[in-house]
Image (cartoon, grey):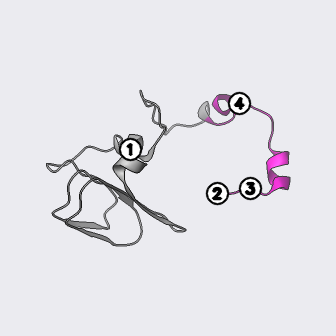
Amino acid sequence: MELSIESFESVPDNSIDYAAMEKTRNATALAFDIDCWQALGHLKESDSCNNRIQGDTVMMIDGHNCTINSENRLVGVVGVDSLEIVDTSYALLVADKQRT
């Protein structure tokens, strides 16, 4: 989501905890700093090959230590190790975990 300058300037000057978090009923609090894509992978349990997969559109064969998030498009992964894959409606990120 990207706001135009006009829209951004019209937003009330409130802290995020007051403006959004006090009203939400569906939030997750994390006990670690989200400073890289690897940190987001810890939100999902890992499988026997240490893969963390979010979404029902991921097919993996012989993949290890990967974090994959795809909610819409089919993502096929074969014979890879230590990748971060994030597929959104506007972009696809494929990166080595050590470089995220």
Q: What label sits on residue 3 in the rendered view?
A: 3
Circle number at residue 38: 1
- CB atoms at circles 2 and 4 under 8 Å apart? no
**Magenta region:** 1-20
Pointers 1 and 2 in contact (C-beta within 8 Å): no
Total numbered badges shown on the rendered structure:
4
Residue 16 or residue 67, whichever sits in front: 67
Say which element carries label 2. Answer: loop
Spot occupied by residue 2 in the image (x, y as percentages of width and height): 69, 57
Q: Which label number is shown at residue 1?
A: 2
Q: Is residue 58 left or right of residue 35?
A: left
Q: Is residue 45 magenta?
A: no
Q: Helix, strand or loop at disc 4?
A: loop
- Residue furthest to the front: 99
Q: Which mark sits nearer the N-terminus, 4 or 1? A: 4
Q: Residue at x 23, y 62 (%)?
A: 80
Find out whether the residues at labels 2 and 3 contact each other: C-beta distance under 8 Å.
yes
Residue found 41% across the figure and 49% down from its top: 99
Q: Amino acid at mark 1?
A: Gln
